[in-house]
Amino acid sequence: GNSVTQMEGPVTLSEEAFLTINCTYTATGYPSLFWYVQYPGEGLQLLLKATKADDKGSNKGFEATYRKETTSFHLEKGSVQVSDSAVYFCALSDLGNQFYFGTGTSLTVIP
Amino acid sequence: DSGVTQTPKHLITATGQRVTLRCSPRSGDLSVYWYQQSLDQGLQFLIQYYNGEERAKGNILERFSAQQFPDLHSELNLSSLELGDSALYFCASSAAFANTGELFFGEGSRLTVL
C-alpha cells in the first residue's frame, strides 16, 4: 500500500543553519508529493508540491525535488529563521485522491 | 485563511457523551476529509466524502460516524466518548478529483473529554 516515512524529530537548529528533513515514500503508480507545515495553534497549510518525477517544488525559500529513482522528496532550506519553527508533514496523494501523511517532524529554530 | 470553516473551535465534555463537529468546505470543493491529531498518534485519517458519498475510510472507530450533506458541509459525530478521544479534529477539503489537488485544512476543533 501507499505510505510515507519521514525523519523523526524533534529537530533543533540555530538561525541561518541549513535544514534537511528526509522523506521517502512507497506508492503504486505516479503519486503527487507535498510538504505541509503546521504552525503552533493552526491547521496544516500547503508549503510546496510536486506532481511528477524530477519536478522541484519551492516556496518561502524551501525546496524539495521529486526523485522517483530513490522514492524521496526531501525538504531543504539554506538558511532557517526563527519564524520557520513549526511541524512539517510530508504527504502523497494517489490517483484516487487519497492522501497519506508522514508522522510529522517538529522543527525549532533558536536565535 | 484556507476557506475551510470548522465549529466549534473548542469543546469540553464528559466521558460517555456525544458531540458533533461541523465543517464547511471551501466554496466549490466537493471532497471533505476528516483527520484526528493527537500527541502520540500523529495525523490519522478518519474518513473521506466526495459529493455526498463516502469514498474512503481510515482508522475511524465504530463509535464515530460522519456524513456530507447536499450543501456539501460535513459533520463528524463522536459518541460514547472516552478519555482517549481527546484530540484535535481537522477537516480538509479538496477540489480536484485527480491527485494533483491539494488539501485545504480548517483550524481544527479541539475536543477535551474529562
Image (spheres, coloured by chain):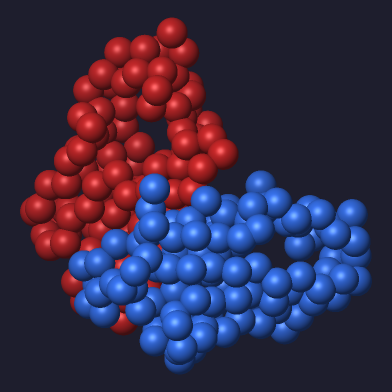
x, y percentage for residue A44?
44, 49
Image quarter (top left, top right, bottom left or bottom right) of the C terminus of chain A: top left
Q: Which residue lies furthest to the top in this view?
A: A111
- Give left or right: position of B65 versus A106: right
Q: Would residue A94 be seen by someone viewing this image from the given angle?
A: no
Give the residue displayed 29% in from the left and 62% down from the top: B102
Give the residue displayed 26% in from the left and 58% down from the top: A33
Q: Would residue A21 be seen by someone viewing this image from the given angle?
A: yes
x, y percentage for residue B59?
60, 74
In red, which chain? A
- Give left or right: position of A45 versus B12: left
Image quarter (top left, top right, bottom left or bottom right) of the N terminus of chain A: bottom left
Q: Is residue A40 above or below residue B99?
A: above
Residue situated in front as seen by the camera: B15 or B41: B15
Residue situated in front as seen by the camera: A38 or B3: B3
Q: Residue furthest left?
A: A54
When asked about the image quadrant of residue A59, the answer is: top left
Q: Chain B is drawn in which colour?
A: blue
x, y percentage for residue B53?
45, 91
Q: In this view, does A37 lie above or below B108?
A: above
Give the residue displayed 32% in from the left and 21% down from the top: A80
